[in-house]
Image (tube, grey):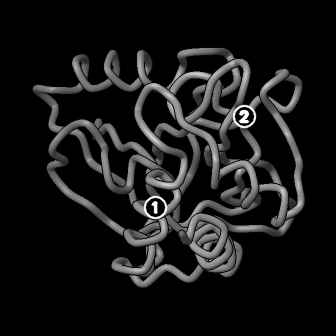
Amino acid sequence: MAFWVFGYGSLLWNPGFTPEETIKARLHDYHRSFCMLSIHHRGSEDDPGLVLALDTQAGGQCTGVAFKVRDSEADTVLAMLRERELISSAYYEDTVELTTDAGKTIPALAYIINRGHRQYCQFDLEKQAQIIARAVGGRGPNTEYLYNTADHLTELGIKDDDMAWLTQRVRALTAT
């Protein structure tokens, strides 16, 4: 059986493996949201950043990319993803049903925010921009995460109004 992974944030531009196949796909009843405080990769315990997570939203949808993992790399890729994505228990791993533009359904592994975790948050866009503009973590500045994700969504033809607004606002906040 094929092993697919859903990319909606940093996996879009840094999956950590070379996929056998890549397909644009949608996940229904979720949305992409900067709703996870980053205390490791894009911020710290003392000054958290924000990273994207899949958050439940009735009637919502998140368009991203389904990455097919080569059978020979399945165990290695799964171990790498778990080490990267499950650094804390803020995300949980689940199999979701994606839909392609052609109407095909693909079961894929996804990392979803645990709403009961202390890193879960809900901030308005202005507060998100303020946090992203200043935070830095073990993998670099939070701005880099935002800009890379926004650029890849644009390249893929995926419209995300909140991401576009945040990118413009953070650029204004960090202009010197």
Q: Quadrant of residue 63?
A: bottom right
- Please tell me which residue is depicted at 15% across the width and 26% down the height of the picture: 73
Q: Judging from the image, what secondary structure is the residue with disc 2 in?
A: strand
Percent across and percent down for residue 176 are 54, 69
Badge 1, how many Cα within 10 Å: few under 14, some, many 20+? Answer: many
* Viewer-proximal residue among 76 and 123: 123
Q: CA distance from mark 2 to mark 1?
A: 17 Å
Q: Amino acid at mark 1?
A: Thr
- Please tell me which residue is depicted at 84% across the width and 56% down the height of the picture: 127
Badge 2, how many Cα within 10 Å: few under 14, some, many 20+? Answer: many
Residue 159 shows which numbered tag? none
* Viewer-proximal residue among 10 and 165: 165
- Please tell me which residue is depicted at 19% across the width and 48% down the height of the picture: 19
- Please tell me which residue is depicted at 83% across the width and 69% down the height of the picture: 59
Residue 20 vertical position relative to residue 169 in the rendered view, above or below:
above
Q: Amino acid at mark 2?
A: Leu
Kindly identify which residue carries mark 1.
149
Q: Judging from the image, what secondary structure is the residue with disc 1 in?
A: helix
Percent across and percent down for residue 105 are 48, 61
Kindly identify which residue carries mark 2.
37
